[in-house]
Image: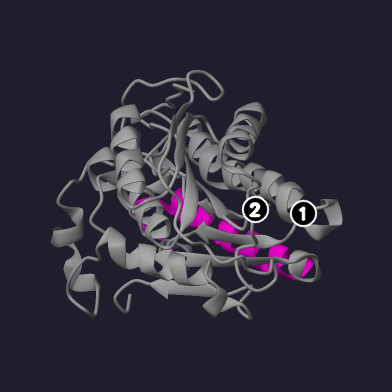
Amino acid sequence: MSGTSGADGVRAGDDGRAEDGVRAGDGVRALGGAVGDVRAVDGAAGAGAAADGARVTVVTGGGRGIGAAVAVRLARAGHRIAIGYERARDAAERTAEEVRAAGSECVVVRLDTSVEAEVDALFDTATEKLGRVTGLVNNAGITGPLGRFAETSPETIRRVLDVNVMGAMLCARRAVREMSTRYGGGGGAIVNISSAAATTGSPGEYVHYAAGKAAVDALTVGLSKELAAEGIRVNSVQPGMVLTEIHAAMGDPERPWRVRGRVPMERPGEAEEIAGAVAWLLSPEASYTTGAILRVAGGL
């Protein structure tokens, strides 16, 4: 999730946390490891396959939180991973080490997902270092500070929508041009990380964020229909209250426990529980699943 930050303390990146790092295409570090016996999967059935039969998946916002859990879970399933991050370089490198320890390969690239040239650099690096991209997890996102809509600055609203909506669209657009059979690709799968806020609206907290996530779900449905005959499946996961550092970034680190009474299961979720849903949607077991909005929110 540029070292760009919006007004009112908005930070673009891995769940809104800040650290220094290198820019997309600059100082990209490849972390190698032996890739396991990955079975080639037909593009329409699973996540496609690179020329050597490997699955290569781009995970934006992959340095921490849900993105990091997804990266490691997919590595254990045999995916080569390209981690995109905005500011949390050290966290992204630690996640990459976990990916390598799982027996996979990884590249780490800094980018602002709302900048097309930086998105292109991420995908170009993934292809050069790992092979043809076969999957995308559109996870990069920010919230800005908690507050009422009328008291949220236009700069904050604009930055949140730039990253969460435009960023997701730019990444999906490039992924389609890599994977669609219409453009010479071998097929693949996209999983967009939405939020339960897309349907609850999050009044008094971040209505602008909720509206952006509803747009991501609309993108999911539309693309799933547009790309179904081109070997690409597109689905969305809606996490609920999950224990990540994004809550500290929005100014309320104890929020998952403070408001857990809203959740029928009476507890916040773990990032690994979201990662399991994402991994299934990228797997051959989900071969007939496209256009789905999968809620993983403890009943919320």
Image position of 116 with respect to 106: above or below: above
Q: Position of residue 170 (x, y in %)?
A: 65, 42
Q: Position of residue 120 (x, y in %)?
A: 66, 33
Q: Residue placed at 83% from the left, 52% from the top?
A: 184
Q: Residue placed at 37% from the left, 68% from the top?
A: 276
Q: Residue placed at 59% from the left, 32% from the top?
A: 125
Q: Position of residue 143 (x, y in %)?
A: 39, 44
Q: Position of residue 31 (x, y in %)?
A: 41, 35
Mark 1 is on which residue type?
A: Gly
Image position of 106 with respect to 240: above or below: above
Q: Is residue 70 left or right of residue 234?
A: left
**Can you identify the residue that label 2 sits on?**
50
**Do the residues under discs 1 and 2 have CB atoms within 8 angstroms?**
no
Image position of 58 with respect to 269: above or below: above
- Image: magenta residue range: 201-226
Q: Is residue 266 left or right of residue 20?
A: left
Q: Is residue 43 left or right of residue 98?
A: right
Marks counted in the figure total 2
Image position of 104 with respect to 262: above or below: above
Camera-nearest residue between 179 and 213: 179
In terms of secondary structure, what is the magenta stretch mainly? helix
Q: Is residue 71 left or right of residue 281?
A: left
Disc 1 versus disc 2: distance between alpha carbons? 10 Å
Q: Which mark is residue 96?
A: none
Q: Is residue 69 magenta?
A: no
**Can you identify the residue that label 1 sits on?**
185
Camera-nearest residue between 143 and 281: 281
